[in-house]
Amino acid sequence: MGNIVWLASYPKSGNTWLRAFLANLIANRAEPVPLAELRNYCDDESFPERYAELAGKPAATLDFAAVSGLRHQVHAQIAATHARSVFVKTHNPALYSEGDPIHNPTVTAAAIYVVRNPLDVVVSMAPHFGLSLDEAIDFLGHEQAGSPNENLFIGQWLGSWSAHVAGWADQTFHRALVLRYEDLLEKPAKTFGKVVKLVAPTADAQRVARARNHASFRTLAQMESRDGFIERSDKAERFFRSGRAGAWREALTKDQVQRVVDRHRVQMTRFHYIPGGY
């Protein structure tokens, strides 16, 4: 068994929140871990430097096929540079590309996947990617949706929200944990407790509570206002917008809600996201 614990999600679904919690759990400091230090506690399979080194040319020049061909090597490099378990962020789906699993199974130990109501994902993702709400709805339903190669991150294939969720939720990892974003909000002690049980079962209650407080949305938003955040899209005014559940009720029209439900009904039903009347 490998040593990578994947921290997976569709974009704007709580991945950064989870990483902040784990960083503060590990650091166990009196003050919150600054946003700029999150990468010290969690690696990222989309950092372009490793791809550029393996390819011998800038990562931004690589097409999807080239990136896919290098991914397992990158995962092996990440695993080899850490003697113990390492948390690794991914937005890629747990699917297959060119007949091979996207995530290298030989270096995988476990996975934590955060799923969020796609109605709220639409509202959060639109400003992050510089899309209108209608464009964001279309994006969530597109089987070939993905992100481009950029200076900060290599391109990732996202696929549709439904395929992304189903791929991770149906994984057969020996240790796999699927969490609802809304449960992290509404039942933080119980839900973050599941994360602790998986990755740090000996952590005491005071340490866990401090990590939760240091990773609260309010704290993260305040740090972004004070220090900035490198992961903020240049299309958005801020990365941490509201973080609440149900923002779609004020942002989406009835027709827009119906489009999302019609496209993603199976997985929305599975995770209890179908609003009344739809």
Image (cartoon, rainbow, N blue to C red):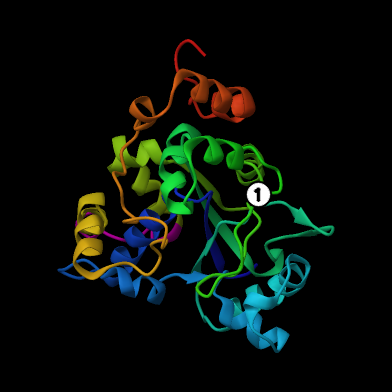
Residue pictured at 51% horizontal, 20% vertical: 255
The one of 268 and 212 positioned closer to us in this rendering: 268
* Location of residue 38 in the rendering, given as x and y in whole percent from the top left corner: 36, 70
Q: Is 127 positioned to the left or the right of 242 in the image?
A: right
Residue pictured at 38% horizontal, 55% vertical: 236
Residue pictured at 76% horizontal, 54% vertical: 96
* Location of residue 118 in the rendering, given as x and y in whole percent from the top left corner: 50, 35
Q: Is residue 143 above or below residue 201?
A: above
* Location of residue 114 in the rendering, given as x and y in whole percent from the top left corner: 48, 46
Magenta segment: 199-207
Q: Secondary structure at mark 1?
A: loop
Q: Is 58 positioned to the left or the right of 28 in the image?
A: right
Q: Is residue 205 magenta?
A: yes
Is residue 13 visible in the rendered structure shown here? no
The one of 128 and 23 positioned closer to us in this rendering: 128
List the single residue furthest toward the right.
99
Residue type at mark 1 is: Ala
Q: Is residue 260 above or below residue 152?
A: above
Residue pictured at 57% horizontal, 25% vertical: 259
> For residue 264, what is the image quadrant?
top right
Residue identified by numbered label 1: 145
